[in-house]
Amino acid sequence: MTLRVAMIGHGFMGAAHSVGWRQAPAVFDLPDSVEMAVVVGRNAPAAAAAAAKWGWAESATDWREVVARDDIDIVDIVTPGDSHAEIAIAALEAGKHVLCEKPLANTVEQAEAMAEAAGRAAARGVRAMVGFTYRRTPAVTLLRDLVADGVVGTVQQVRAAYRQDWLVDARMPLAWRLQKEHAGSGALGDIGAHIIDMTQFVTGLDLTAVSGILDTIVKRRPLLASGSGLTGEAGDGFGEVTVDDVALFTGRLSNGALASFEATRFATGRKNALTIEISGDRGALAFDLEDLNAVQFYDNTAPEGMRGFTKILVTDPSHPYVGAWWPAGHTLGYEHGFVHQAKDLVEGIVAGTDPHPTFRDGLQVQRALAAVESSATHNSGWVHIDPPATEGL
Amino acid sequence: MTLRVAMIGHGFMGAAHSVGWRQAPAVFDLPDSVEMAVVVGRNAPAAAAAAAKWGWAESATDWREVVARDDIDIVDIVTPGDSHAEIAIAALEAGKHVLCEKPLANTVEQAEAMAEAAGRAAARGVRAMVGFTYRRTPAVTLLRDLVADGVVGTVQQVRAAYRQDWLVDARMPLAWRLQKEHAGSGALGDIGAHIIDMTQFVTGLDLTAVSGILDTIVKRRPLLASGSGLTGEAGDGFGEVTVDDVALFTGRLSNGALASFEATRFATGRKNALTIEISGDRGALAFDLEDLNAVQFYDNTAPEGMRGFTKILVTDPSHPYVGAWWPAGHTLGYEHGFVHQAKDLVEGIVAGTDPHPTFRDGLQVQRALAAVESSATHNSGWVHIDPPATEGL
Amino acid sequence: MTLRVAMIGHGFMGAAHSVGWRQAPAVFDLPDSVEMAVVVGRNAPAAAAAAAKWGWAESATDWREVVARDDIDIVDIVTPGDSHAEIAIAALEAGKHVLCEKPLANTVEQAEAMAEAAGRAAARGVRAMVGFTYRRTPAVTLLRDLVADGVVGTVQQVRAAYRQDWLVDARMPLAWRLQKEHAGSGALGDIGAHIIDMTQFVTGLDLTAVSGILDTIVKRRPLLASGSGLTGEAGDGFGEVTVDDVALFTGRLSNGALASFEATRFATGRKNALTIEISGDRGALAFDLEDLNAVQFYDNTAPEGMRGFTKILVTDPSHPYVGAWWPAGHTLGYEHGFVHQAKDLVEGIVAGTDPHPTFRDGLQVQRALAAVESSATHNSGWVHIDPPATEGL
Amino acid sequence: MTLRVAMIGHGFMGAAHSVGWRQAPAVFDLPDSVEMAVVVGRNAPAAAAAAAKWGWAESATDWREVVARDDIDIVDIVTPGDSHAEIAIAALEAGKHVLCEKPLANTVEQAEAMAEAAGRAAARGVRAMVGFTYRRTPAVTLLRDLVADGVVGTVQQVRAAYRQDWLVDARMPLAWRLQKEHAGSGALGDIGAHIIDMTQFVTGLDLTAVSGILDTIVKRRPLLASGSGLTGEAGDGFGEVTVDDVALFTGRLSNGALASFEATRFATGRKNALTIEISGDRGALAFDLEDLNAVQFYDNTAPEGMRGFTKILVTDPSHPYVGAWWPAGHTLGYEHGFVHQAKDLVEGIVAGTDPHPTFRDGLQVQRALAAVESSATHNSGWVHIDPPATEGL
């Protein structure tokens, strides 16, 4: 049998997902074949060009029609967040397996509706997955495995940050990502979501409460030139930035440990510096996305005088996902996570199990984001995060 | 003329200060000679042994008598924090220049009294200085100079942490540092004080408000064996830890920028990891005390494609303090800051100017620490920090 | 028009080249389309499986037939080195553009014949290229560009090493790579060739003489189990290792500068540690393949006190090849060089120019390897390397 | 009893040795007290100034008189290499313990005479020691201990380099260090000697043969201005550099393993980059003098997938020499080796045993240096190194 994929949207994430769908069958021995059937975009020529460039068999302009087609098995959603809920729910109800780019939605309400739809779909054997793709960087999967194996013992502290610097230049214009009505959130939802998800994924613990602050460092930016669309060159006049540039927050994990978080677009010189460190009573683990083929491990049970952070190059055939690629010492990059994501979704579909992160996982992140926003508007007081009502969600 | 020094106390800090007094005259061309006159400790044989070992001419047991001696010019206080105020004020009133180990005091009230005494003494030409010695690590002084020179432009964000791991072992007994009545505070006052001071020193900005949380991870520890004093081996029974193991807080600087702080004794594998990163619109600077001969500088004005963090080895003769030591590439260590501290105090005395950090600086740190504690007991709400009443303080 | 590619061979390198051919058209805007037409292997089912897995339209078993087909434009050779000359010359004479995996050949004589064939083919508009793919790692291309731009000034010293450790385990059996009759050479030809090529490429200088030594550290290894082919599990008995485990040599570059080289399979803990450092009177550049998204640059003309190695993350859109991939800070890996190689060959074919490295470049490396072997058998005396007779070769 | 020290010479090394003698008694519990009795220099005011600055009780101008004094126990020689033999032999024959800065001498003949004198002196209970001080950097001593403990197994390869860049500037004048009649040798004897000694010390193996080349990159430099002494500013005219700028050589160790060496003053951006890596069948160890508080250890016996280089911070109380200094995580610097050297010499004198490195060790290094020079003048052919005739030497 062949799984036929429709991808809705074709921006930067569309390119990355396309690589995933192209490469997964060539690199891994998948239990089923995959066909890149159709890419959907409102602008017909642009969608056709994307199809030609990335190897989709055809293109289309109406996602509703595509979602309704009998010959589509998987709907991969890479549109902006405000359309996720509508498309994903429609696709699930049409019996399509869904891969939805993160964040799951722009609001908790939307995310709840999606998680409920995923729950109903699961009962019919239909799978749903959120695209927190960094989970599938081999080093991050290894972190999760090592924590689960107990190498750090009890998690006692987590330190996570995602730092970029693309807004440091005050002449950068007021693109859609800086407007709340379009983007929903700034650094918090865009990159803060990643470190929340990674913390929960790697430790196996949920965030139960947060205290935090949001800040907008450059409050007014040049308006976009007329005709340049939602992104583009600066034009005349200035407008107000309505999302956060930086989010600083502290969280309490379900085992009682504290975790610190920083999401910022103003860390001058840091391009994509997602870093996380998990400290436990038996050891510690650290990771840096700018050096993504490595994990740092401190074994607190090693003999005294011989302890230190060990830089494990995560390129051994025994490491997660790595065996299908190159020999030891040959590195992978950013896009490989998308290949692994496609593989795991296909395997989940064939096996009849939901690959993580589930829509429930996505909803939990959404609730944490909302709690940070709430705390920020209440003098940084602590805000409790309700866990999703049932495991089955 | 010769400056005759009396040192009150002789623990770990006494050893470090003794190195400072021994080495400063041999390494730097001081404007005055220095005599290590007397070391004071309650236990006469221990004080005598310390004098012999570290090269103090004599020892004594009563600090009041020593402070009153006509032949003493400088009183160097390295006792626990609860005695700082009494000794320092007495010494200043006796017309002695004072070097007081950090933190200035255990309470804001004590620190205020000390700052007032320093203000009165200054009017009489008597100097007072707090021992935030890390300021005099050449790399840290260079950070300050570079920020002042504008290489980072406007400071927009600061990320500071001081992470140790000596409490990760739950069998570590309940030493005095873990009891509030003796230590006053835990990680916050001990190491959090350093990153507050360093942030203010390097940026030239004051903290104006904070929001934070304190946490005690291991809440009960073995009692000390009877007869083992305030530190020592574990004995029978358990007692409650009454200070914080970890302090996480966010601060607002006087120019409006946010700064994040983490002080912890539970960062498994981190021994003395004081790290700070200052991000501005023109560049960024970073420092790590575990690699203390280097500064990382990102020049955001460099040509595109050539930007990156430059690891400046702070061992050039042109770097602060370095010219008096070894050729380029020959590294310094922890203790050199104490040599520089002694040098700067002597130079300040001869020049008739207060070397930084002044008691006012120490008081400002004390207020910040108290504000964090207050926030922690008020659901992490923001607490304003009053600046010292007058500049002249 | 479409360029139809035939790939001869389908081992590890076949996988990497296949990725190159699959991805280049999707990532770059090529001037011509590419069709993965046929993969050739002696074993029909294995070749068919490779075709299915990697997306080749068909498979075949006789390379001579394929090379003779009218509907093939490019012949990509990824067979072992002893067959390169025969296939490449036949393909060039049949008017096919040729991409030949490194090393160009197993002997200087074969390499000379290939370079001559390439010279004749060039006159007819047929292109030939050697697969020193590391040249197309963006950071390595950037090194070359920066040296050419003069940022290091006059090259005064080069330090290059390629260190692996897969032979440290003495139980590793006597695979074909350890037998001179099959492999031709050991560490020298396999990985030493890379650092010779990279040194010449990056500096723009040729090696003119070498002095060196070869050594075999583990001289006898377990024979392969019968029936396990040329690689596989250890069986009974031991045999002699007839190639080098380590090659240490010094070279003289055409501008008179010295370069040191180390190629070893016994650098315990080093998996794929190709490192190179170029020192000049105005600056220095360094690169490490285990951290392949970065270049280290030391600007000797920067102000005193501000100099240091700058770690340039080679992920900016302005960096070589990077603009077609992901945003700044998103890293690439090992295989991307193969994509860039396919792109550059296609562009060279359409433009009518030979993409580097040419067969002449490959021949020059072969001569350097032979000179090292000669020096090693003559007490490490210096051996001159003749440059290829004419530029036109 | 008190050991009274006379130091002959007072340049840069005199400063470092003075720190050693000042600090050793204050930091370590020495079995005997030490008195800094007299410093000797030809220029009386300069010697007096050195005495005052560094704490020597008196100064003198005639080393022969000082060596003959009954009240001197230890003669510490920090003069240029051409005077070592005469002073050391006279001191030993006068019954003084001798510490002689490296290199032991400028020629093998001088070194042999010194080793013979040390042998005769040892029979009378008089100690002799060479100042290869880097051996006493805690991390280097730890390397030696770990190799001896077998953590790397059989040493199979060594890679050592000492790279500086102070001659890259072609305007640097022709100081005495660049003239063979004064300096004896260039990079080879100055810094190559260190990596030879460190290799032999850490591995416990002798060099038995070498092949190498010396090169002078900038062959003519500005003459010194008249009146500026042997060092100083550039004047009119140019002169020939008669020593090597760079030495590249390969050595064979007594167990058959190869070692590569690079000593250069032209490694742009490298200030004092002494690096060494020891590879064995069970593990590897690496060290970098620019990061001297750390050792990198790769444990090849660790579980697969968990291997990597562990950065051991050599600041634990259990590490060599460290217990006498500061708590874990507090770093040491360049000069601490001189303190450890003074300590070990005093302990050796009291215990009646020669502290390493002995004059025999110094002679062995001298022979290796001479062998490199011989090889360099014989087309890099291999030159055998005779081991010192007897262990007792």
Image (cartoon, coloured by chain):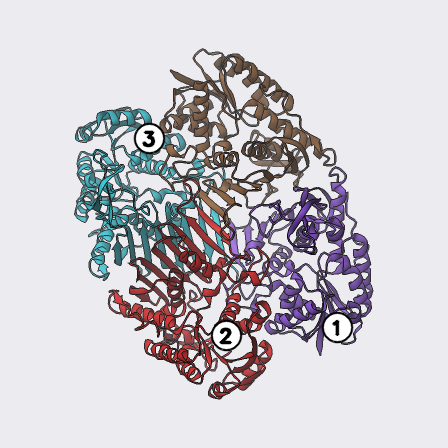
Chain colours: A brown, B purple, C cyan, D red
Identify the residue under disc 2. Answer: D350
Q: Residue at x 29, y 64 (%)?
A: D210
Distance from disc 2 to disc 1, alpha carbons, whole Å, reads 40 Å
Residue at 48% in and 38% down: C330
Q: Please name the residue that numbered disc 1 is placed on.
A: B73
Q: Residue at x 50, y 32 (%)?
A: A135
Q: Marks 2 and 3, Cα distance to the nearest angstrom? A: 83 Å
The x and y percentages for residue C43 are: 21, 28
Which amino acid lies under the numbered mark 2 shown in the image of this protein? Val
- The spot of residue C188 in percent (x, y) is 27, 50
Which residue corresponds to mark 3?
Answer: C32
Q: Chain of mark 1?
A: B
SS class of the residue under badge 2? helix
Q: Residues within 10 Å of mark 3 (few under 14, many from 20)?
A: some
* CA–CA distance in space, label 3 to label 1: 85 Å
How many numbered marks have been drawn onto this rendered protein structure? 3
Circles 2 and 3 on the same subunit: no
